[in-house]
Amino acid sequence: MTELNARAGALNDTRVIELGQLIAGPFCGQLFADHGADVIKVEAPDQGDPLRTWGRGEIPTWWAVAARNKRCVTADMRKPEGRDIVLRLVEQTDVLIENFRPGTLEKWGLGYDVLKARNPRIVLVRVSGYGQTGPYSPRAGYASVGEAMGGMRYLCGEPDRPPSRAGLSLGDTLAASFAFMGALMALKERDRSGEGQIVDSAIYEAVLAVMEATIPEYSVNGEIRGRSGAKLAGIAPSNVYPCADGAILIAANQDSVFDRFCTAIGRAEWIEDPRFIDHRARGAHQDLLDDLIGAWTQSRTMAEVEALMTESGVPAGRVNRAPEMLADPHFAARQSIVDVEHPMIANLKMQNVFPRLSRTPGEVAWPGPALGAHNCEVYGALLGADDAQLAAWRAAKVI
C-alpha cells in the first residue's frame, strides 16, 4: 500500500488485515489502527468476534475499545469464496494479523506460502500461546496459560496463598505489543529487501521477556524468586501504605530518594541507621521499615502524604480506580481519557491512543463498528464488487 488514507497518524500509509479474535490479535490490530493504519477486520458472518459480547454491565463496552478505528467486514473463510475475498485483499495489504491455533490458516488454505505467492511483500503476524514451532505449538493457549508457563503467575499474589492473577489479560496484551513491534521491524526491513516475513509472537515468550532477572538469578545463584504480595522482595521502601482515608503507594527505594523521604517525614536518623543505610540493608529489614512507614502514614490523609512526597521529590501516587482516573486533573490535562461518540452507548469514555507522537499523533476516530459495517465500502473500493456481487455473496452466506 502506498497511498495515504484519509486518517491522520504515523501509519496511515499502511493497510492491515486482522483475522484474529478476542484479545491478542485484535489488540495488535488496535495499535496499528490507533496510529492511522487502515485496519480491515475480517469476521465470520454468522457471529463475528466473541469479544463483541464480552465486558461488564448491561451493554458490553470492550468491543468499542478493541475494534476502534477499524473497518469491519465479514467473510466466511471456511468457504472458497470467502478465502478468495481474503486473498484478493492480501494483494493490496502490508500486514496480516492472526491469532488462531497454529495450523488453522494452513487448514483454510491461507498459509504463508499462499499469502506470499499473492503478495511477496506481505508481513504475516502470528500470535499464539506457544509459538509456531516446538512440541507445544499445536496446543490451545490463552493468556492465563501463557502467564503461568512464562513464570508471571508464580510471582503474583501473597506468599501464603496460591498464585493469583493481575486482573487483566497481560499475556495477551504483551504478546500483541511485541507482535506490533515485530511487524514494524519487518516493515522497516522490507524497505531494504522488498520482501515480507513472518512475525512469530508466543504469549509465554512475551511474558518471559519481561521476567527481569528471574532466569539468571536461578542459573547463577540458585535463587528462585517467589510471591511477595504488594511489595517486591528486597526493594524497600516500595509499597502501598495505609492513610486515614485510604492508601497511597510510596516508592523511595533508591538511596538518594530514601534520604529525601526520611528528611521529609522527620526521620532523618534512619539515613545513618545500619538497618536502612543502603539498598541491601533496607531489603533485609523490609517488613520493619514498612511497619514504621505505615505507622506514620495512617494518621495522615492521602492528600497530605501526596503533597509532602511531591514537595520532597519522592515518587508516590494514589491507587486509582476508574472513578479516580476520570476525576484526576493530570489525566484531564493530557487527555489520557477521551469521550467517544457511539450510536448506541451514552457517555462512552475510553483510554486515549498511546504512545504519543508530537508531529503525527494517533487518534480515536470511531468506536468498534457493527458486524459487517464496512462490507460495501471495502469490497466496493478495493475489490470492485458491485451491488449484484455483494447480494450474491450475502445470499450464499459468504459475507
Image (cartoon, rainbow, N blue to C red):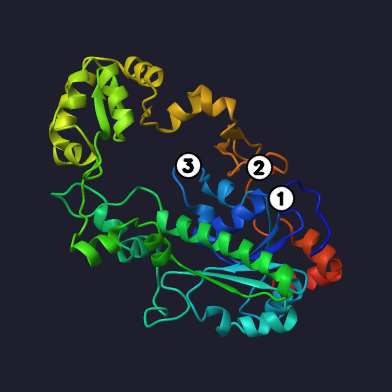
Instruction: Please give the count of numbered marks on the rendered protein.
Output: 3
Residue indicated by mark 3: 58
Which label's residue is closer to the chain start, 2 or 3?
3
How many residues crowd mark 1 within 10 Å: few (<14), some (14–19), many (20+)? some
Label 2 – label 3 distance at C-alpha: 35 Å
Q: Secondary structure at mark 3?
A: loop
Residue indicated by mark 2: 357
Q: Secondary structure at mark 1?
A: loop
Closer-to-camera residue (195/219): 219
The answer to whether the residues at label 1 and label 3 have Cβ atoms under 8 Å apart is no
The answer to whether the residues at label 1 and label 2 have Cβ atoms under 8 Å apart is yes
The amino acid beneath tag 2 is: Leu
Which label's residue is closer to the chain start, 1 or 2?
1
Q: Secondary structure at mark 2?
A: loop
Q: Position of residue 383 (x, y in %)?
A: 82, 70
Q: Position of residue 85 (x, y in %)?
A: 73, 74
Residue indicated by mark 1: 10
Q: Position of residue 370 (x, y in %)?
A: 65, 53
Label 1 – label 3 distance at C-alpha: 36 Å
The amino acid beneath tag 3 is: Glu
